[in-house]
Image: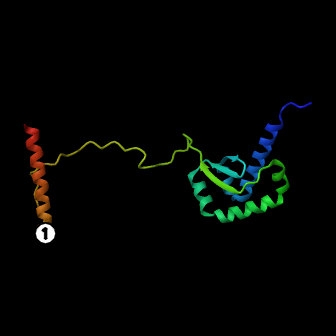
Amino acid sequence: MDLGLGAATTKITRYRLGMNLAKAGLKESLHRFIDSVDCEDARLTIIFTSVVAKFEFEHSKEQILSRCREFYKAHSKEFKELGFVPTRIETKVKEAKDNIVFDPFSKPTPRNARKKIATSGFENQAKDPTVFAGFEKIRAIIQKQEMEQNL
């Protein structure tokens, strides 16, 4: 009696084998950052929950791939029976709302309210003539803005 579960069973077995391949290649400390794997024809995509885990993968990729090759050699019969021969291993990071990573460029922070407004009545104590001239240019700009506000 066939329940039509053949394709689903194959996908589950392929997923399990792909997950085992990923775990065989990665250090045990990175196993908790694996969210899932995507097993396509010739590509295994490891989906991490952390950017740091992806960075660690990229940093030690050759060592990870050599451990994956050893696992593949030991289980090659299972891979070939499923028609899943991964020749490329890639990584992605799952975008999660609870996985907040600080990105200073993602959105601007609100400006702080000005505590003190600059006026043209400051004392220029610069000794260097070029720095003195620079402050005088700043004074002229402030005076111009003060005149525009008074109109």
Residue topped by disc 1: 128
Whether residue 134 sits left or right of residue 66 in the image: it is left
User: In the figure, 89 relative to 126: above or below?
Assistant: above
- Quadrant location, the C terminus: top left
What residue is at 16 percent from the left and 48 percent from the top? Answer: 118
- Amino acid on which disc 1 is placed: Asp
**Outermost residue toward the bottom?**
128
**Outermost residue toward the right?**
1
For label 1, count other residues whose C-alpha is less than 10 Å away and answer few (under 14), some (14-19) or many (20+).
few
The one nearer the camera, 65 or 29, is 65
Relative image position of residue 67 (x, y in whole percent) = 73, 62
What residue is at 36 percent from the left and 44 percent from the top? Answer: 109
The one nearer the camera, 134 or 112, is 134
Whether residue 75 sits left or right of residue 58 in the image: it is right
Task: Report how many numbered discs are placed on residues in the image.
Answer: 1
Rendering colour mode? rainbow
What residue is at 12 percent from the left and 45 percent from the top? Answer: 145
Observer able to see residue 93: yes
Observer able to see residue 125: no
Relative image position of residue 42 (x, y in whole percent) = 71, 52
Relative image position of residue 104 (x, y in whole percent) = 42, 49
- Quadrant location, the N terminus: top right
Dividing the picture into quadrants, the one containing residue 113 is top left
Kindly state the secondary structure of the residue where label 1 is placed: loop
